[in-house]
Image (cartoon, helix red, strand yellow):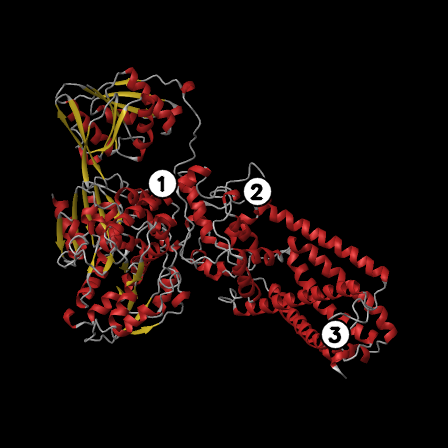
Amino acid sequence: MPIETLTREIFGNIGPVPKALFYATATVAGLIGVATAWKRIRRWRLGHPDDSRNSLGQVLRAVAVGVLGQSTLGKTRPAASAAHRCLFVGFAVLTLGTILIAVEHVAALVAGKAADDPVFHKGLYYAIYEPVMELAGLAVLLGTGWFLLRRRRADSSIEHRTSDWFVLCALLFLAASGFLVEGLRIIEADSPGRWVSFVGATVAGLLEAVGVTRTWAVLLHQVNWWLHAVVALGLLAAVPSTRLWHAVAGGVLLSSYPQRTLGTLSSVTIEEVEARGVYGTGQLTHLAIRQLVSLEACVSCGRCEDECPAHAAGKPLSPRNVVQDLAAQLPEIFSDNAPVLAGEVISEETLWSCTACSTCVEVCPLGVDPLELIVGMRRHLVGTAAVRGSAASTLGKLGRSGNPWGLPADQRMDWAVGLEVPTVDEQPDFDVLYWVGCAAAYDPNSRRTARAMVRLLHAANVRFAVLGERERCTGESARRMGEEFVFAELAAANVAELSRHQVTRIVTHCPHCLNSLRHDYPDVGGHYEVVHHSEFLAELVDQGRLVVDQPNDQAVTFHDPCYLARVNGIVDAPREVLRASGATIDELPRNGCRTACCGGGGGRMWLDDGPDQRVGRDRIDEITEAGAETVVVSCPFCRTMIGDGLAEQAAQAASVKVVDLAEVLVESLEESG
Amino acid sequence: MHVLVLAEHDGTRLRAGTAAALGFARDLVEDDGGTVTCLVLGEHVDDVANDAASYGEVLLGAHAALAEPLAERWAKVTAGVVRSTSADILLGASSTFSRDILGRAGGLLGGAMASDVTGFRRDGGRLVWQRPMYAGAVNASVVLCGSPLVVTVRPTAAEAPPPRPQPGSITPVEIDAESLPDSTGYQGLDSRPSHRPDVTEARVVVSGGRGLKTTDDFERLVGGLADVFEGATGSSRALVDAGLTPNDLQVGQTGKVVAPELYIAVGISGAVQHLAGMKNSRTIVAINSDPHAPIFEVADYGIVGDLYDIVPEMIEQLDAD
């Protein structure tokens, strides 16, 4: 059979009256869909405008990669992600195919062509179009079937609504009835080259085998066609009222706004607060439009909840629930007496449970940022003086003394006693600034990191300097606790000091200082090249400036800090340093960018908790179960949290050593012996 | 000069901080022959009034409306007494209680306030108060402008005075319950019964750290040493983490902040999170087997050795005294 003759009649077997009826139904369904969608979109417009939006080119790229390519899916739950790809891609292709049919139909009307003489829906085009649509239909069947089976098992992290059954059953019905309609059409119209529609042809074959004649097919086709059409149009009208809406809101979110870098937070200045009269998120209208959209983009899949360390520790926080509880307030957005979000809709304890580890932001396929929402609500708590206890006293000490423990600035260099540590005034022509951070300055345990680091810098003949007594806390935890103005004050003082000495390159052993200097400081005018000491040391080893002459062939366990690995993607450098020292690394089950939180970030370091409720308990168990003798850390917070957490084991059995990787490396140098 | 001291009590006795504040008040009036009066408020507080009378004159405001120390009521009554007795200085111990009530009373009186005072001197006719600032990094000298003066005193600023041979008189104060505000209510008291004083109030605190192996050891050694001084027990975070001590004993950045006269750190290495909670103690004694333990950097006295040998001997010798 010649390929040119391939085609099928649009609206074949559907008479003029039913056709008109179909137009009317489609119009009504479309109007209902648009009206309900508009109700939702109208609410978005109450948010404050976003500072940055994607250009048209960026939107198109984001649609292609993020939306159609589903590139953000699959960091966790590989099976569900694959099923979603099947369902989404299949559904998108079928929708596109249906739109092409409509285009063909209108084009044929305009051109005044007969029903069996299509404009382009024929020949080679048709020979490609049909199998693609068949595959898409199969993909939808497969994906929907998987989701239906999963929904039968009650998995607590997956939220259930009755409408979900409607959506999934409707999708399943659409795919199945689509094939059935096709099979009946093949019998009824006796289409040429039926095997182009291979599933439809199979269905037709089966129907013929059970004795469906052409006469029967004419009738059955009409019935099935209508069922298919009514369900399809019903689903279209229901999109904004069901979970399918996430595809629209998520599409807008993923495509319209630039992808945010992990570790960044939106900044707010005192001028903006004065102008708007709002600090933090007390009401939904205090959110950005992007954030309001994100509340509806959340499909409540629970990937974030699976990964949240606070949730795992039994804290009341689930990032998914935060987003969903806020979304549940959206119908009240026009009301004057909507409940206060921070403290009422989301409890204070929930808000303070977050370690800002950023895993929820990382795994969300739709680009929802629960961390930003939480920090926004923490800002509200700070702004309404609702912060109490050790959190409040730490913020007070940060503001007063420039360090979280309220210790005097003139003790900031006590860690360096007996070492040659030049300040920026003593060594003005330094190549790199060593940012010591408060922990290494004041905490006797973390001082060992800085002391090891200085010996390594000297061994490699690095011209370095420190800010000394003028260095202050970066303000990292203040910012993540919602105290933007203590952060701004500390950051401004540090930036002034760094500018005064024309600092361009900074090395630090603290991932929190690193992230703040890298991602927070550009907001306050500080732009530097910031490297972690693991990167810097790996570089020195690589250049041959640090020579290991006493390799220590010990086996160590390495714990990746959230703000080093997940947030800043630094995973290889610390391992290179460890291997260079001669050590072998026993990896923990959760390592690299998928590391587990120690519980010290996001200001949690300064909050009082019973040990059984402490975030990061499971990480301690993981380390203990791995049988580690030495845990290598590369973050002062991890050092404290893991060191304290291991105390229980230490009280009972052989103690586990907790050391920084700089200490491991320095031990392998000859001069240390 | 007339000094009025607001009593903080447990229903039967004055708290140690108030006794110290009375001693501080006595030092204040020593030169100019002024008077010190203790104001006792509450309900059924005759025992407290008798305890206070052993130090001098007492004003007693007993009424059901004052059963609990609600700041808005107590502050109003206190301010009224300051006015009616023309007191020059209103004094209290540095505590949550005083922060709550004296600050408010100072506001009602339009007075001038200094908190956490550790000492005073006279400069000509002026009183110059000493108070630590910037977490003890600076000792500020403060002159208050205005009157009356409202001052809270660190428990370590003075000794409790010796009792008078003759108890002072107890004069009742009229309480007009109708005029008292009632916009705050009393919900309840949640406290852990313990025969030892609260770690934030005690003049002596003995704290245990990772050097201790079991709960029994903690009770026998740390608790035993604390009992010798009638002091409180505290704990480092590591010991709380090890499940050996309850969370509310924790001293440090994320626990209680204490500044007793004597702090004995038993088997505590001295992480900064712990130091932040106790470095302002007047005298710090550290016992640790590791001579390089950072706790020795802040300690006034250090004993290097096994706490399991040293502490029992300390208890024995101190008990013998």
How far from the left and from the top, in percent, is residue A246?
A: 59, 57
Q: Is residue A247 left or right of residue A550?
A: right
Q: Which residue is mark 1?
A: B191
Look at discs 2 and 1 and give the one toward the viewer.
2
Q: Is residue A320 left or right of residue A500?
A: right
For badge 1, the amino acid type reads Ser
Q: What element does badge 3 sit on?
A: loop
| Marked residue chain, label 3 | A
For badge 2, the amino acid type reads Ile
The answer for how far apart the CA atoms under marks 2 and 1 are is 42 Å
Q: Does A619 sit above or below residue B277?
A: below
| Marked residue chain, label 1 | B
For badge 3, the amino acid type reads Lys
- Taking the view exactly as shown, the residue that stands out farthest to the front is A111
Quarter occupied by the C terminus of chain B? top left
Q: Which residue is mark 2?
A: A333
Q: Does label 3 or label 2 sit earlier along the sequence?
A: 3
Q: Which residue is mark 3?
A: A122
| Marked residue chain, label 2 | A
- Taking the view exactly as shown, the residue that stands out farthest to the bottom is A1
Q: Does A278 sit above or below residue A311?
A: above
How far from the left and from the top, in percent, is residue A194?
A: 76, 79
Q: Nearer the viewer, residue B179 or B308?
A: B179
Q: Is residue A638 left or right of residue A424?
A: right
Q: Nearer the viewer, residue A610 or B293?
A: B293
Q: Is residue A179 left or right of residue B194?
A: right
The answer for how far apart the CA atoms under marks 1 and 3 are is 84 Å
Can residue A68 be seen in this snapshot? Answer: yes
